[in-house]
Image: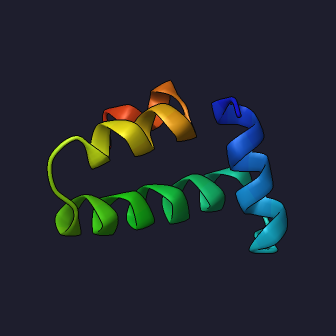
Amino acid sequence: MKYDEFIKHVQSVAQLNSREEAERATYGTLETIRERIVGDEAKDIGIQTGRENQKEL
């Protein structure tokens, strides 16, 4: 899934009013996940959720 598709999906599922809200929710969630996982798991999640998310993990 490409980054734009992922953010649109988050916006739709979470019933958010804007793309910016969806991005903030995504980054907040990824930051929390990053704090709790180890090893290459962060890299794997970043790859699966789009290139833009890799830097967050």
For the rendered model, the colour scheme is rainbow
Residue farthest to the bottom, as pictured = 15
Considering depth in this image, is 19 or 34 the residue closer to the camera? 34
Given residues 12 and 57, the one toward you in this image is: 57
Looking at the image, which residue is at 69% across and 47% down? 7
Say if 46 sits above or below 16 in the image. above
Residue 57 seen anywhere in this rendered image of the structure? no
Q: Is residue 40 above or below residue 38?
A: above
Counting from the top left corner in percent of width and height, residue 13 is at 80, 69
Residue 17 is left or right of residue 37, and the answer is right
Residue located at (64% from left, 33% from top): 3
The residue depicted at 76 percent of the width and 61 percent of the height is 11
Q: Is residue 30 left or right of residue 41?
A: right
Quarter containing the C terminus: top left
6 relative to 51 in the view: left or right = right
**Image location of residue 45, percent across then percent down:** 43, 45
Q: Is any part of residue 17 visible from this angle?
A: yes
All told, the count of numbered labels is 0
Residue 31 spot, x, y in % from top left: 30, 60
Position of the N terminus, as image quadrant, is top right
